[in-house]
Amino acid sequence: MLRIDHISKTFNPGTVNAKLAIDDLSLKVNKGDFISVIGANGAGKSTLFNAIAGSFFTDSGQIVLDGEDITLMAEFKRARKIGRLFQDPMRGTAAGMTIEENLTLAAGEGGWLSRITSKEKEHFREVLSQLGMGLEDRMKQPMGLLSGGQRQAVTLMMATLQPPSLLLLDEHTAALDPGAAEKVLAITKDVIEKNNLTCLMITHNMQSALELGNRTLMMNQGKIILDTAGEERAKMTVQDLLDRFKVSAGHELDNDRMLLQE
Amino acid sequence: MSIAAIGTLAQTALELGLFSALVVLALFLSYTMLNVCDLSTDGCFTMGATVGAVVAIMGHPYLSIIAAMAAGILSGFITAFLQTKMGVDSLLAGIIVNTAWYSINIAVMGGSSLLNMNKTETVFTKVGDALEGTALSGQYKLIVALVAVALTVIFLSFFLQTRLGLAIRATGNNPDMVKSSSINPVFTTIVGLCVANAFTGLGGCLLAQSQKSVNIDIGSGMVTIALASLLIGNAIVSRGSVTKRAIGAVLGAFLFRLVYTIALRFNMPAYMLKMVSSIIVIIAISGPYFRKQLPLIRRMHELKKRGVSGGNE
């Protein structure tokens, strides 16, 4: 479904700040995979997502999605197939526009000069009511009035109004308070299951990395150092993950937030 | 001041306000909605005036309006193209286009910096003739301007609710979100600036035709005047639907001209207009900034008064 073939990316090439962020990375994602991605700070997790989504072009290699070469496709064109959520809840929505207007743009139906129809409004109400946040009665309010958790939940709905081929979740619950994070995560699981989405999710919580989904990737210095699924993964504990990291990377995993989770 | 004098004052302000309201609405689209400060406004306004004048002098009063708007669209397209496709910074793109249009505008006027339309048939003379003998006779300038502004407000409030309009608003709000909705922000920026500059061109065309002459300086300082009006309008109506805010922008244009017209009555020389508009823009933009800083300044002052004691043991 998604095939990444030997991609590399260096930031600031030719300067003292040159950083090889993605190092000859290859990955095959199967349809219906729900993959959790872990790794230390600066391991290249977000950079990998940026490469897939097209925030920048890779220096070499090839990316194929659904049989289509997207290596040099513009970011906005890829967005038809790739839905994406960021850690910052403000990034996914336009604060100055109403909830309804945000959803209309995301739905992407109708011609340029068409206006929002009452049928669409009804559909949006239905979608929002699934969140159980009472947002269906606040459709005319500006997005900026919503809490971080609410905004992230709406962003998730916007990203999946037209079910994408691939959903990229970049620590999308990390900036939320624990209650909201739990709720957004529950909604995420629900949406993925209902639409049978293929999904990659970066998380800093190693426990949930093993519990969620069917496959786990661990990254270090721009490479995938562990790709585990099935029975092997089912037997794994957090300690196993830490050990595996030490073996591959040659040092302890130093991610403050990860350690605090234990 | 007699009531009649106040009436004349208000009417002058209303007329001038309505002509600049078209530019204010253009900036409402480009500055408030699209978040692009379009500094080509002065040149584009003059271009609308010169192109409109030349076409009207050739004997096409209605076509002149369409031609002026088309010139505005072209100007907006070039400004937008420079900043989205050619890597030119957005402010710089406006300044460059503005400078280039000075030459082009003189070329449009056939090498002269002034054109006279005393005997030219325009929309204003047409409407003036039609109203001859009715109660509204003599009000033709006001009526033409009012219709133009009303049509523009109606168009904008419709346009900004369409999917394209929403995409343009989102581009000014959060370009990342536009991309993730599979819309190219380059496209929305270009369309937004084209539409906005069509109104700037229309404003220039109508002002020139109403005063029956156009000179190369007709648009100079327009962007500041319009920005001042826009910010005044924003202070009156800062929330609510797009339609309400567009009407607020028009009110801002009127209010600005009213204050200015009154100032003229108190013997302020006419050349002070641009100084006044600059000061209004400064107050409108830095006012909220200083209001935010006020608590900090107060606290600094208090700490200074209290002086330092201890902390050295």
Image (spheres, coloured by chain):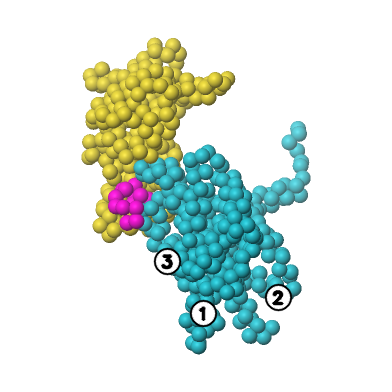
Chain colours: A yellow, B cyan
Residue at 49% x, 65% y is B64
**Discs 2 and 1 carry the same chain letter:** yes
Asked if both marks, 1 and 3, belong to the same chain, the answer given is yes
Q: Is residue B18 above or below residue B285?
A: below
Query: Which kind of residue does numbered mark 1 sit on?
Result: Gly
Chain under callout 2: B
Q: Which residue is mark 2?
A: B265
Q: In what quadrant of the picture does the C terminus of chain A appear? A: top left
At label 3, the amino acid type is: Ile
The image's mark for residue B128 is 1
Q: Secondary structure at mark 1?
A: helix
Q: Position of residue B137 (x, y in %)?
A: 52, 84
Per the image, the residue denoted by label 3 is: B154
- Image quadrant containing the N terminus of chain A: top left
Q: Can the viewer see residue B205?
A: no
* Residue B167's disc number: none
Circle 3 crowding by C-alpha within 10 Å: few under 14, some 14–19, many from 20: few
Question: Mark 2: few, some, or many residues within 10 Å (few <14, many ≥20)?
Answer: few
Span shown in magenta: A102-114
Residue A111, magenta (yes or no) = yes
Asked whether residue B224 is drawn in magenta, I would say no
Give whichever of A240, B7 is nearer the camera: B7
Counting from the top left corner in percent of width and height, residue B105 is at 59, 56
